[in-house]
Protein backbone atom coordinates (compact mmCIF):
# COMPACT_ATOMS: atom_id res chain seq x y z
CA UNK A 1 0.00 0.00 0.00
CA UNK A 2 1.36 3.48 -0.81
CA UNK A 3 2.76 5.60 2.02
CA UNK A 4 2.15 9.35 2.28
CA UNK A 5 3.43 12.29 4.28
CA UNK A 6 0.42 14.39 5.23
CA UNK A 7 1.29 17.98 6.11
CA UNK A 8 -1.37 20.17 7.68
CA UNK A 9 -0.32 23.82 7.88
CA UNK A 10 -2.12 26.47 9.90
CA UNK A 11 -1.61 30.19 10.62
CA UNK A 12 1.52 30.98 12.62
CA UNK A 13 0.03 32.48 15.74
CA UNK A 14 -0.05 30.88 19.17
CA UNK A 15 -3.85 31.02 19.19
CA UNK A 16 -4.08 29.30 15.78
CA UNK A 17 -1.55 26.64 16.76
CA UNK A 18 -3.54 25.84 19.89
CA UNK A 19 -6.78 25.83 17.91
CA UNK A 20 -5.36 23.42 15.31
CA UNK A 21 -3.97 21.10 17.98
CA UNK A 22 -7.32 21.06 19.78
CA UNK A 23 -9.20 20.29 16.56
CA UNK A 24 -6.85 17.43 15.74
CA UNK A 25 -7.04 15.99 19.26
CA UNK A 26 -10.83 16.34 19.57
CA UNK A 27 -11.48 14.25 16.48
CA UNK A 28 -10.45 11.19 18.44
CA UNK A 29 -8.89 9.78 15.26
CA UNK A 30 -5.82 7.70 16.07
CA UNK A 31 -4.02 9.28 13.11
CA UNK A 32 -4.71 12.83 14.23
CA UNK A 33 -4.03 12.32 17.92
CA UNK A 34 -0.58 10.99 17.02
CA UNK A 35 0.43 13.80 14.67
CA UNK A 36 3.86 15.39 15.06
CA UNK A 37 3.90 19.18 15.38
CA UNK A 38 6.46 21.83 14.45
CA UNK A 39 4.79 24.77 16.23
CA UNK A 40 7.30 24.92 19.09
CA UNK A 41 10.11 25.29 16.54
CA UNK A 42 8.47 27.98 14.41
CA UNK A 43 6.92 25.59 11.85
CA UNK A 44 3.13 25.87 12.23
CA UNK A 45 2.36 22.45 10.77
CA UNK A 46 1.26 18.97 11.75
CA UNK A 47 2.80 15.90 10.08
CA UNK A 48 1.41 12.41 9.79
CA UNK A 49 2.88 9.48 7.85
CA UNK A 50 0.40 6.77 6.89
CA UNK A 51 -0.16 3.97 4.42
CA UNK A 52 -3.45 4.54 2.60
CA UNK A 53 -4.92 3.73 -0.80
CA UNK A 54 -4.36 7.11 -2.49
CA UNK A 55 -3.53 10.80 -2.11
CA UNK A 56 -7.25 11.50 -1.91
CA UNK A 57 -7.61 9.01 0.95
CA UNK A 58 -4.65 10.63 2.72
CA UNK A 59 -6.26 14.06 2.42
CA UNK A 60 -9.44 12.82 4.12
CA UNK A 61 -7.43 12.13 7.30
CA UNK A 62 -7.00 15.90 7.79
CA UNK A 63 -9.89 17.74 9.51
CA UNK A 64 -12.14 19.42 6.90
CA UNK A 65 -11.11 23.00 7.65
CA UNK A 66 -7.43 22.19 6.97
CA UNK A 67 -7.85 19.88 3.96
CA UNK A 68 -7.60 22.48 1.19
CA UNK A 69 -4.18 23.62 2.43
CA UNK A 70 -2.87 20.14 3.27
CA UNK A 71 0.11 18.91 1.32
CA UNK A 72 0.22 15.22 0.50
CA UNK A 73 3.55 13.69 -0.56
CA UNK A 74 3.96 10.13 -1.77
CA UNK A 75 6.90 8.44 -0.05
CA UNK A 76 9.11 5.60 -1.15
CA UNK A 77 12.43 4.00 -0.28
CA UNK A 78 15.36 3.12 -2.51
CA UNK A 79 17.85 0.30 -2.62
CA UNK A 80 21.32 0.54 -4.14
CA UNK A 81 20.12 -1.86 -6.84
CA UNK A 82 17.25 0.48 -7.73
CA UNK A 83 19.65 3.44 -7.90
CA UNK A 84 21.95 1.53 -10.27
CA UNK A 85 19.00 0.59 -12.48
CA UNK A 86 17.85 4.22 -12.63
CA UNK A 87 21.34 5.30 -13.66
CA UNK A 88 21.24 2.98 -16.66
CA UNK A 89 17.58 3.55 -17.56
CA UNK A 90 16.83 7.25 -17.08
CA UNK A 91 13.19 8.23 -17.35
Image (cartoon, rainbow, N blue to C red):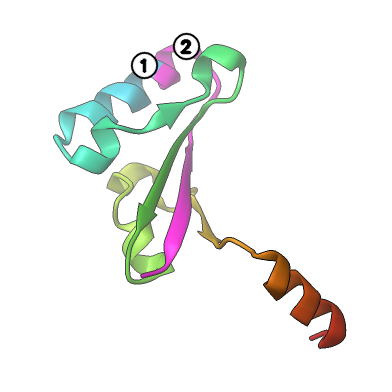
Task: Indicate the position of residue 67 as horizontal and vertical percent values.
Answer: 39, 51
Q: Is residue 67 above or below residue 74?
A: above
Quadrant the C terminus occupies: bottom right
Q: Is residue 14 above or below residue 36?
A: above
Q: Is residue 90 above or below residue 31?
A: below
- Count the marks: how many? 2
Q: Nearer the viewer, residue 2 or 47?
A: 2
* Residue holding disc 1: 18
Q: Is residue 51 left or right of residue 31?
A: right
Task: Indicate the position of residue 38 as horizontal and vertical percent values.
Answer: 52, 23
Q: Nearer the viewer, residue 58 or 89?
A: 89
Q: Nearer the viewer, residue 73 or 78?
A: 78
Task: Indicate the position of residue 4 as horizontal and vertical percent values.
Answer: 46, 57
Magenta-drawn segment? 1-17
Q: Specify few, some or many for label 2: CA neighbours under 10 Å numbering under 14, 14-19, or 20 or more.
A: few
* Residue located at (29% from left, 32% from top): 34
Answer whether labels 1 and 2 touch (C-beta < 8 Å): yes
Residue 60: in magenta span? no
Amino acid sequence: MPKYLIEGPHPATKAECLRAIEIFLRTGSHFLTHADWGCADGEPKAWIVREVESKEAARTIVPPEYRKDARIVGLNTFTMQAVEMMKHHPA
